[in-house]
Image (cartoon, helix red, strand yellow):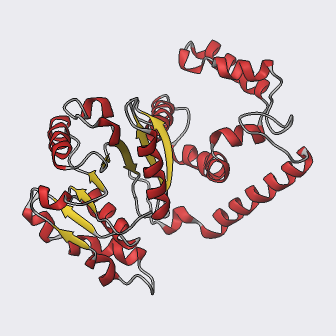
Amino acid sequence: MDQTKPVCVIGAGFMGTVIATIYARHGYAVRLHDSAVEALASYAERATPIAESLADAAHPVAGVLGRVTPVADLAAAVDGVCLAHEVVQEDLAVKQALFERLDRLCPPQVVLGTNTSSFRLTHLCERVTHRQRVIGIHYITPAHIIRAVELIVADFTAPATLAWAQDFLASIDHVGVVCRESPGFLVNRIQLALLAEIHRIVDEGLATPEDIDAAIRLSLGPRWALWGALLCEDLVVNKRTALAVFDYMREQTGVDYYASTPTLRDMIARGEQGASTGQGWYTWDAPYADIVRERDRQLKTALDWLEAEHPVARIGVQRPDR
């Protein structure tokens, strides 16, 4: 990435502070804008803990904070930048007005990013002329530690804009995960579906919060942390078994959510069972016995670490009285 041009972060609240500091840590000159003067004045104080967690010998805290310049005037803040990234309050009218203004202030080659966690780009850009340069760049808290960043694209987002954003994220040691615009995007859609089901399990009295969390920490969590959900499915269950479970859950609960998808049925029809057949969601080119041995080695290492670290005890959590 060309780091000779500055970037602008619009919104000096919690997320804007973190994002601006990340960009500065990786060598970008950052202009931080906010309509609230006090937010700009307090940036360095609020950003210091973030900068401390990112600092090293080559990037001392003072150097990181020194690359962020608070700018009260929006036109001055975006002058000559390669990226204008809005991180303002999650208010559709506020964001629409801001994007309309940014579209006028920034030449068409300047990428306009949004950290929205809920709004479609189509709705944000109703009054934007150069929509091809608009993309969602949605960080996940804590953004300076979580490396995945959702890159949200609409039908009008140019392929060149997406490619630029992917390269930009690589330059700050983050990874862009691409999703077409939809309610909840990628992470929240998955996360909220899981949490909704977990909340229902608690409400139905089927298990305690402690047992639910233990089941996740010691089974789903390590597997998904190592491999993700679909690669994990390839590794641990064949597709016919997955289909049978889906069908049983649908029959027993009457909930259409559990209905199996056409994609799964098509994979089964083609004989794509996962790692055991060499093809599933992924293509596997090693002997299945070798895959299983390496799978088990990785998972045992992760579980041994969890046992040794006792992370729940270390974080100081106590179950509240109910």
Q: Is residue 268 above or below residue 163?
A: above
The image shows a total of numbered marks equal to: 0
Is 1 left or right of 123, judged from the image as shown? Answer: right
The picture quadrant where one finds residue 245 is: top right
Residue depicted at 27% across the width and 63% down the height: 17
The C terminus sits in image quarter: top left
Q: Position of residue 142 (x, y in %)?
A: 40, 59
Left or right placement of residue 170 versus residue 265 in this view: left
Res 39 quadrant in image: bottom left
**Residue beneath the point at 56% across and 12% down:** 254
Image quadrant containing the N terminus:
bottom left
* Whole-percent x, y for residue 256 in the image: 54, 15
Judge whether residue 156 can be spotted in this image. yes
Direction bottom: furthest residue: 57
Q: Residue sitting at 47 percent across and 41 percent down?
A: 187
Most foreground residue, 171 or 212? 171
Q: Is residue 322 visible?
A: no
Depth order, front residue of 294/171:
171
Residue at image coords 85%, 45% = 285
The picture places residue 319, in percent across and down from the top left corner, at 44, 54
253 to 126, vertically: above or below: above
Measured from the top left, where is residue 183 in percent x and y? 38, 30
Q: Tell me if residue 125 comes above or below residue 55 in the rendering.
A: above
- Locate residue 251 relative to residue 202 in the image: left or right: right
